Image: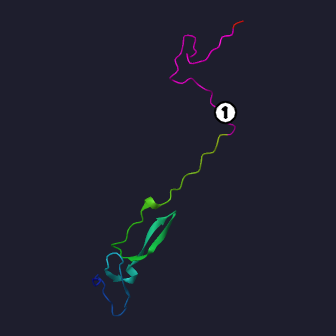
């Protein structure tokens, strides 16, 4: 069972204007008062499936659907050099300044 659309629409006899029905609330409004629902797709706002919506039912486009624009990569360093290997914090040092983890082979002469 359908209901008759209601709304605050007054007809001016001197300047008649067409009316339209809101696709969300089914209220009757002047056709110029209805607008199309938009949403973010990529970096642009696009009209979503052609619905005509009154001002009360119109949604603000959700920014979460907008594509993030990333900044450019930093400029690389010219002629880079590798970092020398340092001892890690887990290494234990002996009295001579070396680590116990070093494999030292003594040669006999």
For the residue pair 26 and 1, the one nearer the viewer reads as 1
* Relative horizontal placement of residue 91, taking residue 82 as reference (left or right): left
* 109 displayed left or right of 51: right
Is residue 41 shown above or below 51?
A: above
Classify mark 1: helix, strand or loop. Answer: loop
Q: Main secondary structure of the magenta part?
A: loop
- Asked whether, in this view, residue 90 is left or right of residue 15, the answer is right
Q: Who's the residue at 54% across and 53% down the image?
A: 70
- Residue 42 screen position, x and y as percent: 51, 63
Residue 84 on image: x %, y %: 63, 27
Question: Where's residue 103, x and y in %?
Answer: 61, 17
Residue, x 33% and y 93% (percent of image)?
13
Q: Residue at position x 56%, y 18% from top?
A: 101
Q: Is residue 75 depicted above or below 27 in this figure? A: above
Rendering quarter of residue 3: bottom left
The magenta-colored residue range is: 78-107
Residue in the foreground of this view, choosing between 101 and 61: 101
Image quarter where the N terminus lies is bottom left
Q: Which residue is mark 1?
A: 81
For the C terminus, which image quadrant?
Answer: top right
Residue 85 on the magenta span: yes
Give the x, y percent position of residue 21: 35, 82
Q: Residues within 10 Å of mark 1 (few under 14, many from 20)?
A: few
Instruction: Name the residue located 41 percent from the left edge and 76 percent from the top edge.
Output: 51
Residue lying furthest front in this view? Answer: 108
């Amino acid at each position: 069972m359908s209901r008759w659309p209601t709304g605050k629409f007054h007809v001016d006899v001197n300047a008649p204007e067409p009316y339209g029905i809101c696709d969300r609330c089914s209220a009757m409004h002047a056709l110029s008062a209805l607008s199309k629902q938009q949403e973010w797709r990529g970096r642009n706002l696009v009209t979503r499936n052609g619905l005509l919506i009154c001002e009360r039912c119109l949604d603000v486009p959700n920014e979460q659907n907008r594509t993030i624009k990333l900044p450019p990569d930093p400029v690389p360093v010219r002629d880079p050099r590798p970092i020398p290997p340092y001892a890690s914090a887990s290494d234990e040092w002996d009295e001579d300044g070396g680590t116990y983890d070093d494999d030292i082979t003594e040669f006999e002469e």
